[in-house]
Amino acid sequence: MINFINWVQQKSWRHLVGVLCCFFAIFPLYLVVTASFSSNQSLQSTSFIPTSFVWDNYQLLFTDPKVPFLKWMQNSAMIAASVSLLSVLIGAASAFAFSRLRFKGKRVGLQSLLLVQMFPSVLALSAIYVIMERVYVFAPEWGLGTLGGLVLVYLGGSMGVNIWLMKGFVDSIPLELDEAAKVDGASAMQTYWQIFVPLASPILAVVTLLSFIGLFNEFIMARLFLPENEQRTVAVGLQGFIGGQYAQNWGPFAAGSLLASIPIIVVFMSLQRYIIGGLTAGSVKG
């Protein structure tokens, strides 16, 4: 009895705080789930405990010809996967070069990448729009209003952060491994593929995951560069339910949001064993 009283006085508040934090985090998700199965199109009229469940909101996403939901999902997945893989391939090679190789302009290049990241990407919207509009004149498949053009825009914007993050990880790899490889006659390219890439798999997985999640949910650039309905990403397409011709249809919006989270969950679960080690790997050197 005394032990129980001591536990209540000393540790029970921790459990209470934990329960409150869990409730605070789960409540928005619960509200979205209930709204997706509700026949009401307003969040204010959705009851906390639903009395009935309907599939009308999900059926609308797949039956309405004005809502190419699967096409939106395909566009988002293709753009996010392409940019994630390309940014990791280019960023990993750049990080290895900045960390291990000696060349002119190395310090200036790193400082320039860091300086560019200090400015919000919104400041470059007008300039990027004009550039891609002119690119469309001589390369229509890579210009404004194309998925390829949006991939190029995303790729350029994500390189700086990825290079710095991966460079911190490369700096933590002992130089003795490089020296041993040189003694064995390995070139810089062989050292990169046979030593760096296997050791850097945690940070590569984390960069891929963070890039995929961020790009899959990106809205501003996609809304500006993809005006056609068939070319939209899922974030831009679902926004039409609450701000376009569909007015305030929160039910289909909630249903689409839940379905759109499935690819992110799959990618996250498949790479979760790399997350903890990869996120902290580039934070210190030693």
Image (cartoon, helix red, strand yellow):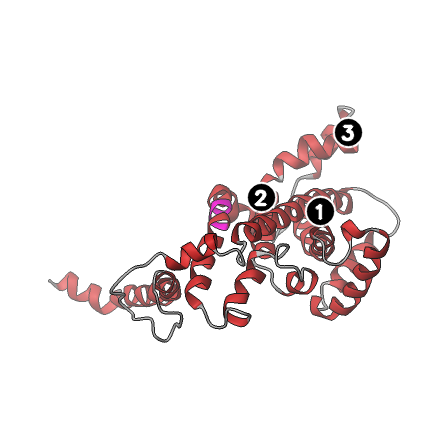
State the image coordinates of residue 271 (x, y, percent, origin top left).
Answer: 51, 43
The amino acid type, in three-letter code, at marker 3 is: Lys
Residue span colored magenta: 264-268
**Going by the image, does 184 lie left or right of 18?**
right
Quarter holding residue 36? bottom left
Checking the image for residue 182, the label placed there is 3
Residue with the mark numbered 1: 91
Q: Is residue 180 above or below residue 162?
A: above
Q: CA distance from mark 1 to mark 3?
A: 23 Å
Q: CA distance from mark 3 to mark 2?
A: 27 Å
Tell which circle, 1 or 2, labels the residue nearer the N-terminal end.
Answer: 1
Residue with the mark numbered 2: 205
Residue 267 located within the stretch drawn in magenta: yes
The amino acid type, in three-letter code, at marker 1 is: Gly
Q: Observer-nearest residue: 237 or 177?
A: 237
Quarter holding residue 125? bottom right
